[in-house]
């Protein structure tokens, strides 16, 4: 027996509404996240002393020991010397002594400053970040500054083995342990930029390597406490082994993060500390002591912090090369001296 079904009026209304939705189609999806518009375009530096501007002088207020902050961010840092067009502002988040943990997300601090990546995320929402340039890794497992200190100690004590002998076999292991930490920091940078609405194509991420601050061509007369107290075999090791191996590790981290790579490993050849009688011809500081700081107990521990870092002239050269590199579409390049004596990016050849 057929029975006539009587549908409640409310159920019929719902059915009509659902049918209408099928006819009209799905609602428009919300607009995709995007970088802020109508705001200043900025170039951002992140990382350690080589990006902060250690040894370049004229440190920004609050970064030269005040309140325990020794980040030594200089107004002469290379990020401010790129000459890149279309940039309204350069922002330096780097801090001397910083490692990958402080550059990335997390709770690590350097001289009281929190995560650089977290601060980048805030900045990226307020400004239009065009490029992020990073130099990090040397303060992780390699502890390169401590290695140079060991080289000086080896010169002072003739009974002590050279730092090349002490570090030679251990160095590859240190570099290998560094690579995943740098890669993770770059991943954190990518993450905060995505959270701020940036696609990877909306900005450029560059990982920069390190230049050798000293080399075996050092003048013998400057191998002393007024110049560069280092053994020649250690100088050979720094240029021929230590810096190339850490450069290879940084290069691998850049590839893993799909970042562009700028190789500075040979950028200072012929301009290292103690390579000229006139220090004005050099791009790196010699053994440096801020004597006034030695008289202040709170500052004495940082009196030699500027030793063996790019000076203002070096930062100017590195900044110029970086600016030219950013103006190209090269995935990787090396900063090398041209016929004019200045550094220029030479495109990388091969893998």
Image (cartoon, rainbow, N blue to C red):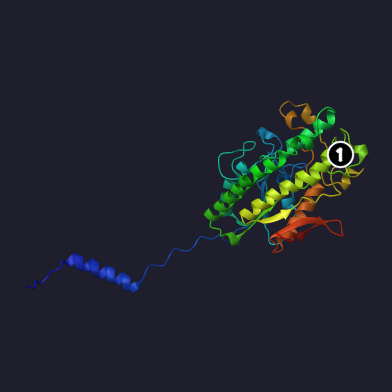
Q: Can residue 72 be seen in this view?
A: no
Horizontally, residue 6 falls left or right of residue 137, namely left
Q: Is residue 239 visible?
A: yes
Instruction: Using the image, determine if residue 344 lies above or below residue 21.
Output: above
Mark 1: which secondary structure? helix
Instruction: Using the image, determine if residue 104 lies above or below residue 340.
Output: above
* Residue located 74% across and 50% down the image: 78
Q: How many labels does the image show?
A: 1
Q: Which residue lies furthest to the front in this view?
A: 169
Residue 27 image position (x, y, % from top left): 38, 67
Foreground pick, 105 / 178: 178
Residue under pointer 1: 232
Residue 289 image position (x, y, % from top left): 81, 33
Residue 229 image position (x, y, % from top left): 85, 35
Residue 308 image position (x, y, % from top left): 79, 40
Foreground pick, 138 / 45: 138
Foreground pick, 229 / 34: 229
Horizontally, residue 348 falls left or right of residue 33, namely right
* Residue located 87% across and 41% down the image: 274
Quadrant the C terminus occupies: bottom right
Q: Quadrant of residue 174?
A: top right
Quadrant the N terminus occupies: bottom left
* Residue located 52% across and 53% down the image: 195
Instruction: Using the image, determine if residue 111 lies above or below residue 92.
Output: above
Classify 10 Å Cα crowding around label 1: few (below 14), some (14-19), many (20 and above). Answer: some
* Residue located 76% across and 34% down the image: 166
Q: Quadrant of residue 219?
A: top right
């Amino acid at each position: 027996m057929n029975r006539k079904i009587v549908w409640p009026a409310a159920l019929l209304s719902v059915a009509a509404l659902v049918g209408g939705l099928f006819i009209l189609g799905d609602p428009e999806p919300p607009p995709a996240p995007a970088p802020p518009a109508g705001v200043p375009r900025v170039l951002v530096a992140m990382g350690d002393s080589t990006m902060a501007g250690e040894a370049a002088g004229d440190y920004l207020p609050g970064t030269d020991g005040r309140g325990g902050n020794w980040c030594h961010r200089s107004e002469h840092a290379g990020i401010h010397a790129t000459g890149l067009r279309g940039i309204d502002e350069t922002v330096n988040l780097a801090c001397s002594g910083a490692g990958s943990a402080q550059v990335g997300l997390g709770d690590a601090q350097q001289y009281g400053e929190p995560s650089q990546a977290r601060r980048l995320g805030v900045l990226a929402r307020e400004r239009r970040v065009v490029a992020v340039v990073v130099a990090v890794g040397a303060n992780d497992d390699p502890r390169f500054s401590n290695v140079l200190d060991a080289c000086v100690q080896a010169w002072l004590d003739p009974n002590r083995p050279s730092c090349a002998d002490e570090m030679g076999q251990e160095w590859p292991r240190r570099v290998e342990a560094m690579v995943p930490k740098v890669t993770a920091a770059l991943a954190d940078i990518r993450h905060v930029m995505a959270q701020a609405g940036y696609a990877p194509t909306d900005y450029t991420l560059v990982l920069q390597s390190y230049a050798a601050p000293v080399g075996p061509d050092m003048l013998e007369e400057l191998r002393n406490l007024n110049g560069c107290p280092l053994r020649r075999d250690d100088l050979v090791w720094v240029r021929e082994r230590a810096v190339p191996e850490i450069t290879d590790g940084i290069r691998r981290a850049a590839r893993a993060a799909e970042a562009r790579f700028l190789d500075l490993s040979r950028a200072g050849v012929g301009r290292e500390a103690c390579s000229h009688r006139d220090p004005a011809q050099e791009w790196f500081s010699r053994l440096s002591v801020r004597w006034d700081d030695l008289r202040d107990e709170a500052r004495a521990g940082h009196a030699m912090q500027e030793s063996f870092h790019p000076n203002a002239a070096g930062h100017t050269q590195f900044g110029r090369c970086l600016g030219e590199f950013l103006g190209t579409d090269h995935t990787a390049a090396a900063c090398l001296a041209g016929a004019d004596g200045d550094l220029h990016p030479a495109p990388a050849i091969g893998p």
